[in-house]
Image (cartoon, helix red, strand yellow):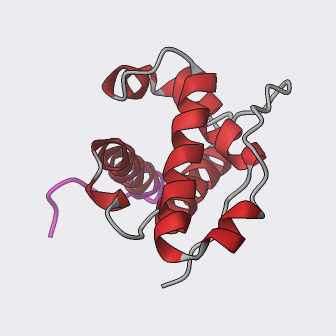
Amino acid sequence: MSSFFVGNKLISKLANTIKVYYPQVLEDLNVKNSQELSRLLYNLNVEALRQRYDDDYIDMIKDFEYDEGDGNFYFIKEDKELAQFFMNLECFLYQCREGNVPDKEEFKVLERLSTDLAYEIAFKFSHEKGAKWGED
């Protein structure tokens, strides 16, 4: 399996979106704001890379910088944005599936969020396409 650093901008955008739409996740992870969440995400990603690659690769990753830019979150009330948020969260989680990182509670909280998002997207799509609940 390979892994890469997803970047500060994506990490900040994920954290900002989680803060706006899923504030319970901040509480579950025991962080106070999106900047602390961004740091946690950065650390998870770097830890996975550290367990996968040698120190020379890790040394190339730039230090964490929180990107607080206006509109730096997914407006997930729009289906395309919800799907993009889900895909980028999945990309992030995939890059963190190295060593013991998937066993960490922080990873598991984010994975539960991803599963919840997948169900939300599936139900929205099913409803829009006229699928009926419990029908053969």
* Position of the C terminus by quadrant: bottom left
Q: Does the magenta stretch include residue 133?
A: yes
Residue 51 is left or right of residue 74, and the answer is left
Between residues 55 and 119, which one lies in front from this camera angle?
A: 55
Q: On screen, 71 above or below 63? A: above
- In the image, the segment drawn in magenta is 125-136
The answer to whether residue 17 of the structure is visible from this angle is yes
Residue drawn at x 39%, y 45% is: 110
Furthest-bottom residue in view? Answer: 1
Q: Main secondary structure of the magenta part?
A: loop
The location of residue 109, given as percent across then percent down, is 32, 41
The location of residue 135, given as percent across then percent down, is 16, 62
Q: On screen, 125 above or below 25? A: below
Q: On screen, 88 above or below 3? A: above
Between residues 55 and 1, which one lies in front from this camera angle?
A: 55
Residue drawn at x 59%, y 45% is: 42
Residue drawn at x 54%, y 23% is: 19
Residue drawn at x 77%, y 44% is: 9
